[in-house]
Amino acid sequence: MSKNLFVTGTGTDVGKTFVSGLIVKKLHEDGKKVAYFKAAMSGNVRCEDGTLLPGDAAAVKAVSGIKQPIESMCPYVYETAVSPHLASRLEGNPVRLPVVKAAFARLSKEYDYVVVEGSGGILCPLRFDGETLQLEDVIRELALPCVMVADAGLGTINDVALTAFYMKAKHIPLKGILFNHFHAGDRMEEDNLRMCEYLSGEQVLASVADGDHTLSISPDALEALFA
């Protein structure tokens, strides 16, 4: 069975997919058999044959160089660019936890490590149509430790602190923070890093600059985040 890690974020468009790709790439280049998984993905492009291309999965494949079949990466793929709970109400095929667990279990048997990316921020609902399913339900069912991706820029102190406080209140295991879009030497972003660590009680594990091709963390330290 695999060791696993969940990648959440302070919100949409903070760079969870890119950072997830770098995590997968680091392990892949270290010789580990690693897979990527996302329970539900919305805002995807419909191909000429009518199928939907899971864009985040394709991006992770491109960044990491893994050969994992894209169809194994995400059991629920939607076209409408809204939260999965609304996309499924508009398009049908709502997210079902047993389906997510079964798809994840198949990867867990085949790979040594699985990186699981969330949708939006930690409170993003996956289903709300008489049945309710939250990201934290998936995290608990799959027993996943978490890292948080945050934008390094203005506003991140509040976003990081509130996300960390919520996760701790809900007993969701948080292993640390990964700063994205970081500019070394920028006084505000350097201060954001220190303030986020102080207010959240969590360490910034690595900072990622735009255009980075690797994650500035050792393979051993990265593997230690997985459980």
Image (cartoon, rainbow, N blue to C red):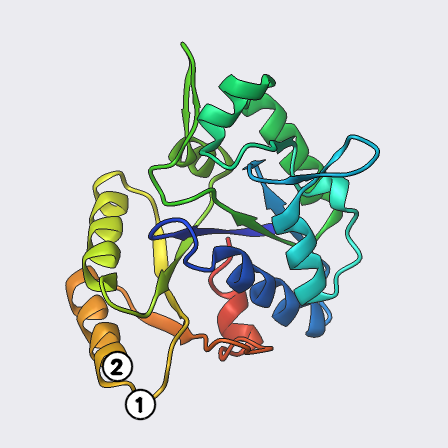
Q: Residue at x 70, y 73 (%)?
A: 29
Q: How many marks?
A: 2
Q: Is residue 187 left or right of residue 3?
A: left
- Residue denoted by label 2: 190
Hey, which quadrant is residue 50 in on the image?
A: top right
Sequence-earlier tag: 1 or 2: 1
Q: Residue at x 22, y 73 (%)?
A: 192
Q: Residue at x 57, y 74 (%)?
A: 219
**In the rendering, which numbered label is found on residue 84?**
none
Q: Nearer the viewer, residue 45 or 180?
A: 45
- Residue flagged by tag 1: what amino acid is it? Gly
Please tell me whether mark 2 sits on a helix, a strand or a loop: helix
Hey, which quadrant is residue 100 in on the image?
A: top right
Do tag 1 and tag 2 residues touch (Cβ < 8 Å)? yes
Vertical arrangement, residue 73 with respect to residue 35, above or below: above
User: In the image, residue 131 lies at what x, y percent?
Assistant: 42, 13
Q: Is residue 189 left or right of residue 18?
A: left
User: In the image, residue 75 lies at what x, y percent?
Assistant: 65, 32
User: In the image, residue 142 lies at what x, y percent?
Assistant: 51, 37
Determine the residue located farthest toward the top in the rendered image: 130
Q: Is residue 43 left or right of residue 28?
A: left
